[in-house]
Image (cartoon, helix red, strand yellow):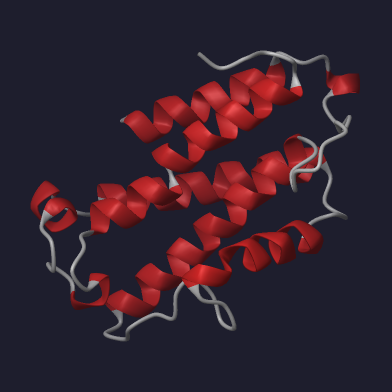
Amino acid sequence: MESDNSFKSLLEIIESVPSRKRTISIETQERDKNFRDVLMHLYEWHAMLERWYREGMDGDIPFMPASGYKWRTIELLNQQIWENYQDVTLTQAIKKLKLSHERVMDLIKSHTNEEIITKKYYKWTKTSNLYSYFAANTSNHYIWAIKKCEVKIGKKST
């Protein structure tokens, strides 16, 4: 599965850095300054996906992306996520992300291909399909995270 491969690649990048250097932040104007910031961003988006999924499957229309935010204010939401996790260690971030990744993978595996790729199969996905939600919060997001982490270790993405 593409998501699992990208997830493993992300962890390998972090593990390639000597442990004493893994928590170093880089000077940047961007929101995410270290591995922890990137991992907790992914973790929180997994949590939102899990909430959307749970509420949608219970017959509700989930509020997306999060209470108090609209898609056009996503930068404010992402900034709030960053602020919420500044006290988390990298070790905690890795554990949390591994667990949330497994939960999301289990959700994906619980569906047939038809359920995942058929648009409007579930009322809560509106005109879209489950795939778009799953991909945005796993494989596509992991590719973003890999690029961010490669910059942090001085490796350019190709």
Rendered position, 129 above or below 55: above
Identified at 34% across, 30% down, the residue is: 2
Q: Quadrant of the rendered structure where residue 150 is?
A: top right
Expressed as whole percent of the image width and height from the top left, the position of residue 76 reads: 67, 67
Residue sitting nearer the eye, 99 or 20: 20
> Residue at coordinates 13% horizontally, 68% vertically from top-left?
120
Q: Nearer the viewer, residue 103 or 17?
A: 17
Residue 147, percent from left and from top: 58, 27
Name which quarter of the figure residue 138 lies in.
top left
Q: Nearer the viewer, residue 35 or 92?
A: 35
Query: Residue 62 falls in which quadrant of the image?
Result: bottom left
**Residue 33: x %, y % from top left:** 80, 39
Please report the residue visible at 80 percent of the width from the left and 61 percent of the height from the top: 83
Say which residue appears at 30% left-offset and 82% top-offset. 58
Q: Split into 4 quadrants, where in the image is the N terminus?
A: top left
Q: Residue furthest bottom?
A: 60
The picture places residue 12, in percent across and down from the top left corner, at 61, 19
